[in-house]
Image: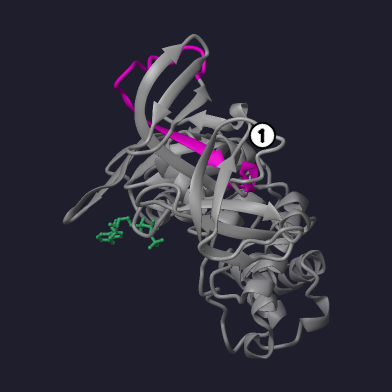
Amino acid sequence: MASAQKASGSGDIELAGLCKSYDGVTNAVDGVNLKIPDGAYCCFLGPSGCGKTTILRMIAGHEDPTAGEILIGGGNVVGMAPVERRTAMMFQSYALFPHLNVRDNIAFALRVRGQSKAERLRAADEMMEKVRLTEFADRLPAHLSGGQQQRVALARAAITGPRVLLLDEPLSALDEQLRVQMRQELRRMQRELGITFVHVTHTQLEAIALADVVVVMERGRIKQAGAARDVYASPRDRYVAEFLGGQNVLSGKVEKVDGSRLLFAQPDRKSIEIPLPGGSDVGVGDRIDVAVRRDDIELRRPEAASPPAQGPGLPGRVLAIEYQGSFVKVMLDTVPEADFVAYVPERTYFRDPFSIGDVVVASWAFDRARLLA
Ligand SMILES: Nc1ncnc2c1ncn2[C@@H]1O[C@H](COP(=O)(O)OP(=O)(O)OP(=O)(O)O)[C@@H](O)[C@H]1O
């Protein structure tokens, strides 16, 4: 980025005790503490209204916190104008100028910053090469595909050399196929630009596919933050497990605690033994939630007793079957008032396919069940 402004200065972000109340909405953001390393791809994930966009707007400087600090590169930016923060925001709608061609759209941000026309166009040409838009330089936005428009919006945000790029639901306007393609493109661009990306989404798969750091939110608070694989494979509690998906959650009462094992039972169901993590203070009579991944469930017919299923198991009736390509999704009535789903690999499934109404036994290896907080 020779003639675009150089992205120097660390883009690590720290949110400390961050709060935001609006008139009528107290605690839209409610005491958020988080560190995002420089050059990381961070995704905020959560249902509508959980405060994701408010956090993004506070980092950008479009909204002031009610309390708390926002540090970028170690300095508190609260009270600073957006341009002084060296952050840039890419909006859902892309907000491109319809009457300017691609090159001029990208160069526009530098005009506002007082650069000469020659400098601006040189920087725009460089940026277009980076985002593979050179061949579209003279086109108007209306004559571009959704994915190309998004690249223009990204280039326009990146040309000012921000240390942090903020993206509000950047893929939501695209169809499914394009969304997957642009996801890869975003990740590639983030690596190439080497700056911190903070991306807001309510799509689980988007967050875990893209992010180094996934932040799961509920009602203004962080429920869990960490590497995508940690958050998906080891959700801390029922909310995170259910929101990220891919897990079955069983609830019940503890019947017995024995060293590193625990026995619990759901109402009117057989007792199940699970591993008890060290340091846990769960006791007999406590209500607990337990997660077992959908792809860890093995399904058998009850009469197929030989060899016996390994580990704990629960009976159930098949409620629905959905072919998903590489696996088959089988829904059971194993858990009262909740979904219980097995992802069976396609090859295994079609050796002896089930029908709706079949009675099956769902089992899993003892150490694949996890006690939730
Ligand atoms: N300008 C505003 N004035 C009043 N209340 C607001 C304002 N902006 C957001 N809120 C409220 O603050 C809460 C958090 O909103 P926010 O937009 O941050 O959520 P979100 O997680 O980004 O949701 P979405 O995915 O729907 O955009 C909501 O209850 C919302 O109604």
User: 357 or 241, which lies in front?
Assistant: 357
User: x%, y% of residue 98?
Assistant: 57, 87
Q: Which residue is disc 1 drawn over?
A: 308
Q: Residues within 10 Å of mark 1 (few under 14, many from 20)?
A: few
Q: In this view, which residue lies farthest toward the front?
A: 303
| Whether residue 351 is visible | yes
* Residue at the (38%, 37%) spot, across then down: 251
* Residue at the (66%, 45%) spot, across then down: 304
User: x%, y% of residue 50?
Assistant: 36, 52
User: 371 or 267, which lies in front?
Assistant: 267
* Residue at the (63%, 61%) spot, across then down: 354
Whether residue 56 is in magenta: the answer is: no
| Whether residue 107 is visible | no
User: x%, y% of residue 200?
Assistant: 50, 56
* Residue at the (68%, 48%) spot, across then down: 7
Compared with residue 20, is residue 370 higher up or lower down, i.e. above or below? above
- Amino acid type at circle 1 is Pro
What secondary structure is marked by label 1? loop
Q: Regarding ligand 1, which quadrant of the image does it lie in?
A: bottom left
Point out the stretch of residues depicted in magenta: 276-300
Q: In this view, which residue lies farthest toward the top?
A: 259
User: 165 or 333, which lies in front?
Assistant: 333
In which quadrant is the C terminus drawn?
top left
Whether residue 295 is in magenta: the answer is: yes
Residue 33 placement, left or right of 135? left
Answer with the quarter of the image where residue 88 lies.
Answer: bottom right
In which quadrant is the N terminus drawn?
bottom right
User: x%, y% of residue 162?
Assistant: 62, 52
